[in-house]
Image: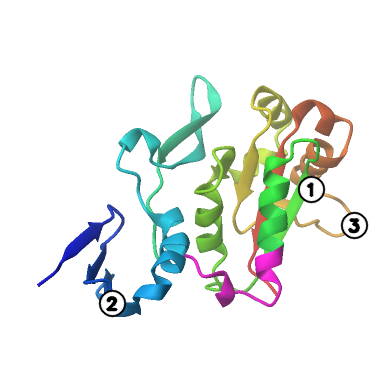
Amino acid sequence: PWDKAVCFSAVNVGIFYVGNIIFYVNYDGFSVVFEAEYFEEYIDFLEQYVFPENPADQPEINYLTQSPRDGLEIDSAPLVYGKPLDLMNYNEGFEEFNKKLLAWMEDWKNTGLVLLHGMAGTGKTSFLRYLCSRSKDLVYIPSDLASHIGDPNFIKFLRNNRRKIFLVEDAENVVVSNGHNRTSALQNLLNATDGFLSDIIQCKFILTFNTD
């Protein structure tokens, strides 16, 4: 019989132990036995993916919407976790990159662009979910609204929503230059993150590309 049970309100996760000897974890249908000495290490890894008991503390994901009357707006919804993110599944040096990226996200003395690239299915979206769980400043731009980055009024929208980090997936069609000319979207991104306007707007962008 179980001596004690510690249950977390995450997705199908239960952690139990029998007399301080072993731990049983049920995660997405998989059963794993952990030695007691590694329990704290496992909790440290798992805690960032666990839903808090208080719904008010549950992480949210911000995303861009558009209404006929008000134009572009930022809305939010509860962040639904998937499997825990293991940074070891990414390329060599990714853990160090992740530390630098998280520090950059919190430092509003610096703006700029971050480009994430990799073939489809290599974990870019999972990494973006992980980033959303670490900061309330992130705003996801759906693909059907990404074209608005090139609109003249987009700079005004950024000015009205200072100190935000915008996420754009599959950005090839949005910012890649056609020939020798920059797209209007790329021009707006450069102006907002590296030009004079960056001091006023103070926004950041993280873009993903499906390429090596």
Pick out the residue farthest to the front.
19
Horizontally, residue 135 falls left or right of residue 81, namely right
Figure quadrant of residue 150: top right
Q: CA distance from mark 1 to mark 2?
A: 58 Å
Point out which mark residue 183 bears: 1
Residue 67 in percent (x, y) is at 48, 27
Task: Find the distance from the CA under tag 1 to the CA under tag 3.
Answer: 10 Å
Task: Using residue 182 as the reference point, say whether residue 168 is left or right of it.
Answer: left
Residue position for label 3: 180
Residue type at tag 1: Thr
**Residue 87 appears in which quarter of the rendering?**
bottom right
Q: Is residue 143 visible?
A: no
Is the N terminus in the top left, top right, bottom left or bottom right quadrant?
bottom left
Residue at 78% across, 41% down? 111
Q: Which mark is residue 96?
A: none
Foreground pick, 59 / 67: 59
For the record, the magenta segment spans: 85-96
* N-terminal-most mark, 1 or 2: 2
**Residue found 50% across the figure and 38% down from its top:** 62
- The three-letter code of the residue at mark 3 reads His
Rendering coords of residue 92 (x, y %) = 69, 77
- How crowded is the residue under tag 3: few (<14 C-alpha within 10 Å), some, or many (20+)? few
Name the residue tied to disc 2: 22
